[in-house]
């Protein structure tokens, strides 16, 4: 009889935890609902409600700022109370209720209230949800877990506009009814998180091999979970946040890429298909790259992804024909695929498990709060000096971010 010990199961062949699978489907359905109507909100505000582009800027700017602040608060609060599910449930319920309400509003100020309420929901759920994915997954599976979640999110973002197109083909310009229809996937989301999602407690970092190298003094000096200051978190994590801020300052809204694609000759009628192909590539890429991150680690995918971003932005700066826009969009999807699961898994490697809600709060806050000035700077450069300067700016700032990120070290 052989005494050979069976090989341990490979992490990339293990089944993803039930919570992770459920949250993936939740994000898919939520993004189907969201992306059915989000691209049409400017037209609804301006064409139906009689609002202005300035009011659109106020609505979106305030909504995104509120969401960014709440992501920080909700992450820290979920650490303090030791529970994540309640924040996730309330966040998705708010989104489910407020999205269809937009179809009933009659004035821009009412849309402002509804849109900000929707973003309040996003702010409440995002950081606790990310922390719950980490709580539910073994460290060796977290790349796959975050990759799967982002893949489902992008898949929903691809399906939503297709459904909206089909609806408007049957009922042209009936935007109000389209907003109301989003209640259907929204109710499915609420049912899944209320009845399917299970609370999970973060495993103690005392038994987590990723943190066994922490000195006793470091453990004892940890600030209480209520203290949301970044100074209470590891210095490497703070350098990571700084790198993210720099990178986001150079990463403008993807809407500018659509503007550039049209300038390069992509016809307007083809832009939805370009957007669909972009999201499908991001979805498949995240699923593959999540497994890769678990095998080779988080640092190299982030550095390679950010370097690809530099190349893509330089490509957009100097492209001259339409086919190059398609190629650059697909390359840009590879950047997303490499970095999204790696960036989130790195958060769990730099911070103790019982402070990951706060850490994800700062991660999401740093990206969110930098996005507004990023697009303002990029738009100003684009308007005044053209695409070469604007995209060149984004590439240059990304190189600075790579240099800062090189100073981040993982514990051994």
Image (cartoon, helix red, strand yellow):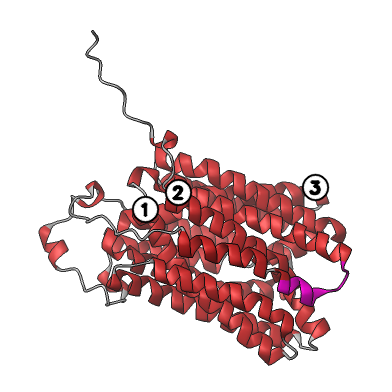
Query: Which residues are drawn in magenta?
Result: 171-180
Residue 143 locus on image (x, y percent): 43, 47
Circle 1 — which element?
helix
The residue carrying mark 1 is 136
Q: Is residue 366 visible?
A: no
Count of picture labels: 3
| In this view, the mark in front (3 or 1) | 1
* Left or right position of 195 against 347: right
* Image vertical order of residue 353 relative to residue 147, above or below: below
Image mark for residue 145 = 2
| In this view, the mark in front (2 or 1) | 1
Q: Residue at x 47, y 40 (%)?
A: 291
Distance of label 2 from label 1 (alpha carbons): 9 Å
Number of other residues with Cα within 10 Å of mark 2, as a class: few under 14, some 14 to 19, many 20 or more: many
Distance of label 3 from label 2 (alpha carbons): 34 Å
The answer to which of marks 2 and 1 sits earlier in the sequence is 1
Residue 286 locus on image (x, y percent): 55, 47
Q: Residue at x 74, y 60 (%)?
A: 161
The quadrant in which residue 227 appears is: bottom left
* Image vertical order of residue 4 relative to residue 184, above or below: above
The answer to which of marks 3 and 1 sits earlier in the sequence is 1
Circle 3 — which element?
helix
Circle 2 — which element?
helix
The quadrant in which residue 287 appears is: top right
Q: Are marks 2 and 1 in contact (CB under 8 Å)?
A: yes
């Amino acid at each position: 009889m052989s005494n050979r010990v069976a090989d341990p199961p490979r992490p990339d062949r293990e089944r993803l935890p039930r919570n992770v699978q459920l949250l993936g489907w939740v994000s898919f359905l939520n993004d189907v609902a969201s992306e059915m109507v989000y691209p049409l909100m400017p037209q609804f505000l301006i064409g139906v409600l009689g609002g202005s582009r300035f009011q659109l800027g106020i609505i979106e700017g305030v909504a995104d700022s509120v969401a960014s602040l709440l992501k920080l608060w909700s992450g820290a609060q979920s650490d303090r109370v030791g529970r994540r599910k309640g924040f996730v449930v309330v966040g998705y319920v708010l989104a489910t209720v407020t999205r269809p309400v937009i179809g009933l509003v009659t004035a821009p100020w009412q849309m402002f209230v509804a849109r900000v309420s929707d973003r309040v929901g996003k702010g409440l759920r995002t950081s606790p949800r990310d922390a719950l994915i980490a709580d539910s997954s073994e460290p060796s599976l977290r790349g796959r877990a975050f990759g799967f979640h982002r893949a489902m999110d992008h898949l929903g973002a691809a399906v939503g506009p297709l459904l909206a197109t089909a609806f408007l083909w049957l009922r042209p310009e009936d935007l109000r009814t389209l907003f109301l229809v989003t209640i259907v996937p929204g109710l499915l989301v609420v049912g899944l998180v209320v009845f399917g999602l299970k609370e999970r407690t973060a495993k103690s970092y005392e038994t987590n091999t990723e943190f066994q190298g922490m000195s006793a003094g470091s453990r004892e000096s940890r600030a209480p979970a209520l203290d949301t200051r970044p100074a209470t978190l590891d210095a490497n994590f703070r350098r990571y946040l700084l790198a993210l801020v720099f990178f986001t300052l150079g990463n403008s809204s993807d809407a500018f890429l659509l503007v550039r694609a049209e300038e390069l000759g992509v016809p307007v009628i083809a832009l939805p298909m370009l957007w669909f192909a972009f999201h499908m590539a991001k979805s498949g890429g995240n699923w593959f790259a999540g497994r890769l991150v678990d095998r080779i680690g988080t640092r190299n995918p982030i550095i390679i992804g950010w370097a690809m971003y530099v190349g893509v932005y330089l490509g957009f700066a100097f492209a001259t024909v339409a086919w190059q826009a398609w190629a650059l969009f697909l390359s840009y999807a590879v950047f997303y695929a490499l970095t999204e699961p790696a960036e989130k898994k790195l958060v769990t490697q730099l911070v103790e498990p019982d402070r990951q809600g706060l850490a994800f709060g700062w991660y999401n806050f740093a990206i969110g709060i930098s996005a507004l000035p990023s697009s303002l700077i990029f738009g100003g450069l684009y308007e005044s000096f053209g695409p070469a300067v604007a995209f060149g700016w984004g590439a240059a700032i990304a190189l600075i971010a790579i240099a800062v990120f090189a100073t981040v070290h993982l514990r051994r």
